[in-house]
Structures are given as C-alpha cells and as structure tokens.
Amino acid sequence: MIKRTTKIISGTLGIGVLVALGIAYYMFNLPHRDVQAAQIDFRLSSTEIVNQYLADAPSANDKYLQEEGDSKILAVTGKIFSIREDLNQQKVVLLKEATEHAGVSCTFTEATGKKVENLDIGHTITVKGVIRSGAGFDEDLDLYEDVIMEKCDVIEK
Amino acid sequence: MNKLSVMAMVSIALVFMAFKPLMGKLVSKDAHISFFSHTALEDITANNYKVVSTLDTETGDLVYSVPMQSFEFEKALMQKHFNSKGFLNTKKFPKAKFTGKITNLESVDFSQDGTYEAAVAGALNIKGETKPMNEKATLTVAGGTVSLESKMMVVLADYGITFTKGKPSTNVAKEVEVTVKAVYTKE
C-alpha cells in the first residue's frame, strides 16, 4: 500500500518535472511572432495614423502599442515618398503625402525587400507591418518624426 | 568653346558638387544602436536600426531619439521581458532620448575629410529618468557625409532598472555596453 502511494507520488512528480522542463524549454526557444502571417488589427491610411498621433499621441500609443512589444499589426495605405536603405541593409519605404510633415516609415526584411525594387516613387501602395513607435514633432530634434513600422511587406499595389 | 574648356568647366562643377559644404543641421534617419550585456552565465545582444538623430555642425548640438520597441533580440522571450512593465515599460515610455553637445567643436573640421575625436556632454533619458553623460565619439567626414561612432557603458540602476530575483538578476549585467553608429546627411 505504502509502496503504491510512493510510486504514484513519484510518478506524478516525475511527469510534473518533465512538463515544467518542457515549458521552460519551449519558452526559452519561443519563436518571434511572424508578423506577415498574423492577422491585421487596423487598416488605415498613412495620413490617418499620422493625424491620430499629431492630435493625441498618448491615446494613440495606448491604442497601438502593446506592453510586451508585440504591438498592433497595421495595413497602411499611402503614397511612396522615398525609398532608402538602413544600416542593416534593409529597404525603408516612406509613405507620405508631399504636403505633410510626417509619414509612415516601413522597414522591410531580407525576405520581403526584393519587392521594393519594383516600386516607384509617387505610387500608392498598402504595406503590412508591426508598429514600433508613433509620429510627432520633437523639439530637441527640431523635426517631425515618422510612424515606424517594421517587418513590412507590400500587400496591395 | 573648345573641348578642353568644356572639360575644365565640367570638372570644376563636379568638384563643387562633391564638396557640398556640410553646414548646419544634419540628419540620420536610421541610426544604429546596439547593446551588449555580459555575465558569466549569458551574453545578450540587441540591435535597433530605427534611431533618429540630428547633428548641428555649427552649434555642436547632438540629439538621439530611440524607439524602444525597435530593439530586436535573438530570443523572443527576452524581447518580451525587455519591453515589459518591470523592465523598460515601452508602452508607457516608447522613446529614450539623448540630448547633448560636442564640446570641442573647434577640433572638428566638417569641411575637411578626415577622422576627428569629439567630446560629447549631455543627458540621457530612459524610462523617465535623466542622467548626465559624457562620452567620446569618433567623427568621420568623407565625401558629403558625416559618420559618428561611439561606445559607452550604461548603468541600468541609474534608470530605475533593477532585478532582485529570478533569472534577470543573475543573467543581465548591471552595466551594459551601448554602441552607436550614425551616418548623417544634409536633408
């Protein structure tokens, strides 16, 4: 009887330890979120999101930024203002109307960057990506900062 | 006009274009900041290529605006921890900022290609805490751009980032090495 109870207890403990190790291993190797495979949270134009930030940055941050960094996934439609490359050799497409102060800066990935080669300045496209920070006028920089999106891809053109 | 004088004029024009003076405010829209934390248990690196910076060649003003959620880690879980309330609380404090000045502006010649050692004094604001910071930076002036490189140590506790228990208290260094690289052009 005692033997049996001991067996059950040690068995349960053993399974418990294995499960805990499994979870720890999974969490340690937790993959990064696949932004392009994830669902779009908001669809809007570059003008709309920039204006939301210029009107009320704290409430826009509250709406779009997430506590653990997995912030909202946006599909932003806008006119291509410029195309450049960052220090990580990734393509950066700025969606902005020529008359506006700020736009949406979209950084592509190694996998999606090739699509940028077929894009032309002035064309209207829709880009899906994750928002990292908002737009606004910064007094120290003395310039307008753009909305920043990363892990981007073109979804409509 | 003969061929020679045309060629002379073209080459003079090219020389002027190549040496467009780098005066006033220069901008770097995609500067790179990385940090490195070393402990006996673990080395942690994160990279951010979305830093906006301005450098004024006339006043020496130097500003960095850092979107905190753009720091990328190898491990997704670490990135989550970094952004969370207990660590950098990036939803509430989405940007860190450095504002400072080059204090030895007389020893940097922005009109002359070359490498210069700059002394920078300013203040770093992370998570609502501002602390003074004095660092050296290397400026390279070459063909119409200015590059800046700098390395500094940042004490996490200065910005209210402390761990008393769990893995972070043993695996995250108390002081992290921050590397800055920016390429400035005239907007």
Image (tube, rainbow, N blue to C red):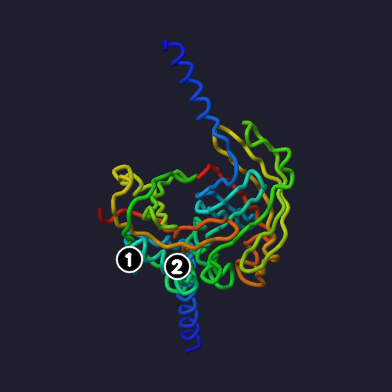
* Res. B75 mark: none
Residue picked out by circle 2: A53
Q: Is residue A18 visible?
A: no
* Res. A44 mark: 1
Residue at the image point whose x is 48% and y is 72% from the top: A20
- Residue type, numbered disc 1: Leu
Between the C-alphas of marks 2 and 1, the distance is 13 Å
Label 1 packing within 10 angstroms: few (<14), some (14-19), many (20+): few
Taking the image as shown, residue B111 lies to the left or right of residue A27, namely right
What's the chain of the residue with tag 1? Answer: A
Q: Secondary structure at mark 1?
A: strand
Taking the image as shown, residue A79 lies to the left or right of residue A28, namely left
Q: Position of residue A107 (x, y in %)?
A: 41, 52
Q: Is residue B152 above or below residue A9?
A: above
Q: Is residue A9 visible?
A: yes
Count the marks: 2
Classify the position of the N terminus of chain B by image quarter.
Answer: top left
Q: Position of residue A113 (x, y in %)?
A: 36, 46
